[in-house]
Image: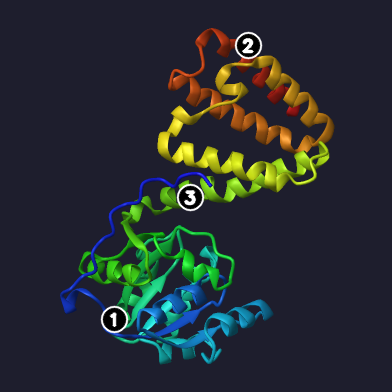
Amino acid sequence: MPASPEPRSPRPEPTDPKDRPARLTVGVVGAGRVGPALAASLELAGHRPVAASGVSDASVRRAAALLPDVPLVAPAEVLARAELVLLTVPDDALPGLVQGFAETGAVRPGQLIVHTSGRYGAKVLDPLLRAGALPLALHPAMTFTGTAVDVQRLAGCSFGVTAPEELRLAAEALVIEMGGEPEWIAEEMRPLYHAALALGANHLVTLVAESMDLLRDAGVSAPDRMLGPLLGAALDNALRSGDAALTGPVARGDAGTVAAHVTELRKHAPGTVAGYLAMARATADRALAHGLLKPELAEDLLGVLATGAEETR
């Protein structure tokens, strides 16, 4: 296994009682992969999940596995029962859900309303302020499976935190209670923050899946075993050293090798060519800027990439 990056020093738990929330009843609106895991983690910290909403078979199974004995009820009933409400719905559904709660008067004064969207900060919850809600945006920078392993993965997980200044300590305390590490994200920076995470994590899955498909086509019987050590080392090196960790034919300026790659990809997996060329160009730009790619080799390489891009159009 590759060495992990140096851990950050743990943030001490607040010791002043006013700096940490009291034991709260917890509700989940949207029993997808995230909500039940967060509620289960809060339960381990002493809070009490009391209600969840979810209609799909998968939601029912997740809630039963991670929140046994917690009843599944309508979203409005979740708000009626809970002091801390987790809104764990898809990003695009969040504004409409909030507006609906505002119009129906479902929110009570002093109720903590927490959403887990990476895209939005606390302002998306503004319609609930008139009812006296306390708005928090707590986004776990983690991929979720919908199983008990998610609760374990929250230990040491960074959370993107956005909240009014007067609620900052409460937001950070909740994250720490879930085993996470709070990272304060300014309201206006939330979309950029979320784009950065999607670029790294979501696109990584696509790249790895495409790489495994190509290795199978090349006759490799266990592409996961072949890629595991390589990708683990590459990730570790990238986290430790950034652009200095760049290796491979693009960083070396091996234009002939890259041209051969493009030819083979067109033949066996034409759908991957555009992505390969885009990532190769981005890699070349970073390698040039960092002094890894010699300028005299870059011209031929960039020519290959430009030709490939023209042929792809």
Checking the image for residue 132, the label placed there is 1
Percent position of residue 275, x then y: 66, 36
Which residue is painted at 52% across and 68% down in the image? 150
Residue that label 3 marks:
197
Mark 3 crowd level (few <14, some 14–19, many ≥20, 10 Å Cα): some
Q: What residue type is labelled 2?
A: Asp
Percent position of residue 82, x then y: 40, 88
Quick one: quadrant of the C terminus?
A: top right
Checking the image for residue 224, the label placed there is none
Residue at the extreme front of the image, as rendered? 1
Which residue is painted at 71% across and 23% down in the image? 308
Q: Work out whether residue 59 or residue 104 is closer to the camera in this orientation and state it.
A: 59
SS of the residue at dot 3? helix
Mark 2 crowd level (few <14, some 14–19, many ≥20, 10 Å Cα): some
Q: In this view, does 25 lie to the left or right of 253?
A: left
Residue that label 2 marks:
300
Colour approach in the figure: rainbow
Q: Distance between the residues labelled 2 and 1?
A: 63 Å
Q: Work out whether residue 298 or residue 188 is closer to the camera in this orientation and state it.
A: 298
Q: Which of marks 1 and 3 is in front?
A: 3
Q: Is residue 130 left or right of residue 67?
A: left
